[in-house]
Image (cartoon, coloured by chain):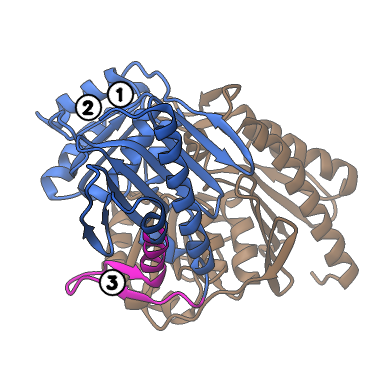
Chain colours: A brown, B blue
């Protein structure tokens, strides 16, 4: 699907309006005693909050008004059909565990899927006040009224690379072992940053993010941002990753190739 | 050692001036291509940067002018003797690995040790713009010109507790296993936040921080903040922790006692 310059501007403006709407909701609940936490999992702890739900509703309200022909796929309220061929893929709070812990590594994720993956992505961190937007061949970071272009950094191999993931377990025992094999080759491994790790990759601060068992709404926003900044995101087999699953994101194709080889050996 | 109201105000003002001086340095280097990273370890990666060194120098310059009789113990430039009985314990950048990765979980730590541990502590996160100060029976968080008192939250036991640490390995294999035994009882465990975890504990967002192999300058600032907010910090045997080593910080004595029992079994 091709987009004219004015269509690109329109889609970006809608994405920003959605991020702004979600920001108002999430900031109202972040670190507030009004935050009620429910558990989605019978056998474990998978929290969802009133902030997740209201933030997705706020984004859906923007789409209902401005893009009624587009489809929606949101974490909390599922799929709504459309007729335009475009789907807005929404994670109102990626990193709900961080959110309920007061740690500002969570983010509002917006991806615009044109059928083959995101053409536009947003990672918004309301408390720090950062908005990362990538798509249509570029990416930028806006904070406090200032905006600057961002891009991934060059990295010649794993021994120079900073790697991030969210949980030490990563996924299944086999997935955890594959991750550990890559981690053992890297200069530095850090944990716990949720979607913010992809933002750090896109701005050239780190070199590699590897995760597993993700959903489409966890990755479409980050893929848009990382690709816009010149990075590469695939699954662990090197195939398109926008449906979720096992994800590897890299700033440099050399690091991507070296990590893929280990993940598959 | 007892401090009059005006002495308390004076000491706090000095601590804030130091934090402000360090903030200027660290913000200049954070996410900057001017940041040079050296490795302190022959067999591993223990980064130190020009930002660490200059930030400590900036804080020492404040002390040279305002508190020339006090001793100093800083991570980068070691010990300087004093005659007042007070020692300023400084970690110019706690979380240098986070700093070089662009993640704003690092902090400038200041502790004022009156001989038996800190009577005043500061955790400053310059990029987010948050300053946590605790001591003399209270604690507060300042951001963007606004200041509010903070306090730990009640928590009736490990099954309701959110636990944080920085590295999944925690310390030695035995220390890692002890941590894992506590973690298995907790509602949620999160990694990667460096000194910011103590700030989250002090403001009642999480319930427990457990770390090992820390230095005095890693803990004196956090101890001041957590104790000021009503929390408890000891070593894994329940003894004073201001010299470093194995650290457990809790917001509620019930959680502290339950975790200590597991750490020592």
Badge 1 element: helix
Q: Quadrant of residue B164?
A: top left
Which chain does the residue under circle 1 lie in? B
Q: Can I make out residue B205 in this image?
A: no
Looking at the rendering, the stretch of residues picked out in magenta corresponds to B33-60
Using the image, tell me which numbered label, if any, was put on residue A94. Answer: none
Which chain does the residue under circle 2 lie in? B
Distance of label 1 from label 3 (alpha carbons): 36 Å
Local packing at callout 1 (Cα closer than 10 Å; few below 14, some 14-19, many 20+) is many
Find out whether residue B49 is within the magenta segment.
Answer: yes
Q: What quarter of the picture does the C terminus of chain A occupy?
A: bottom left
Q: Is residue B103 left or right of residue A145?
A: left
Badge 3 element: loop
Q: Is residue B32 left or right of residue B263?
A: right
Callouts 2 and 1 close, C-beta under 8 Å: yes
Taking B99 as reference, is B88 above or below it? Answer: above
Distance of label 2 from label 1 (alpha carbons): 7 Å
Badge 2 element: helix
Q: Are marks 2 and 1 on the same chain?
A: yes
- The residue at which mark 2 appears reads as B259
Identify the residue at image location x=50%, y=31%.
A47
- The residue at which mark 3 appears reads as A185
- The residue at which mark 1 appears reads as B158
Q: Can I make out residue A10 in this image?
A: yes
Mark in the foreground, 1 or 3: 1
Distance of label 3 from label 2 (alpha carbons): 34 Å
Identify the residue at image location x=20%, y=55%.
B81
Q: Nearer the viewer, residue B101 or A264?
A: B101
């Amino acid at each position: 699907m091709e987009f004219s310059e004015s269509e690109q501007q329109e889609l970006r403006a809608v994405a920003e309006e959605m991020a702004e709407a979600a920001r108002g909701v999430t900031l109202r609940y972040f670190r507030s005693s009004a935050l009620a936490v429910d558990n989605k999992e019978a056998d474990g702890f998978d929290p969802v909050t009133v902030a997740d739900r209201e933030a997705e509703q706020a984004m859906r309200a923007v789409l209902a008004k401005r893009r009624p022909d587009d489809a929606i796929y949101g974490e909390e309220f599922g799929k709504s059909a459309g007729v335009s061929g475009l789907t807005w893929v929404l994670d109102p709070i990626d990193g709900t565990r961080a959110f309920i812990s007061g740690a500002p590594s969570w983010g509002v994720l917006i991806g615009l899927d044109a059928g083959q993956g995101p053409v536009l992505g947003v990672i918004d961190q309301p408390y720090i006040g950062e908005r990362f937007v990538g798509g249509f061949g570029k990416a930028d970071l806006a904070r406090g009224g200032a905006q600057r272009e961002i891009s991934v950094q060059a990295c010649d191999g794993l021994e120079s690379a900073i790697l991030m993931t969210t949980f030490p377990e990563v996924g299944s025992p086999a997935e955890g072992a594959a991750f550990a094999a890559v981690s053992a080759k890297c200069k530095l491994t850090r944990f716990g940053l949720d979607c913010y790790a992809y933002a750090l990759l896109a701005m050239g601060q780190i070199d590699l993010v590897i995760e597993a068992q993700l959903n489409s709404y966890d990755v479409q926003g980050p893929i848009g941002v990382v690709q816009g900044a010149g990075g590469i995101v695939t699954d662990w087999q090197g195939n398109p990753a926008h449906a979720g699953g096992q994800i590897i994101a890299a700033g440099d194709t050399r690091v991507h190739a070296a990590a893929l080889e280990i993940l598959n050996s």
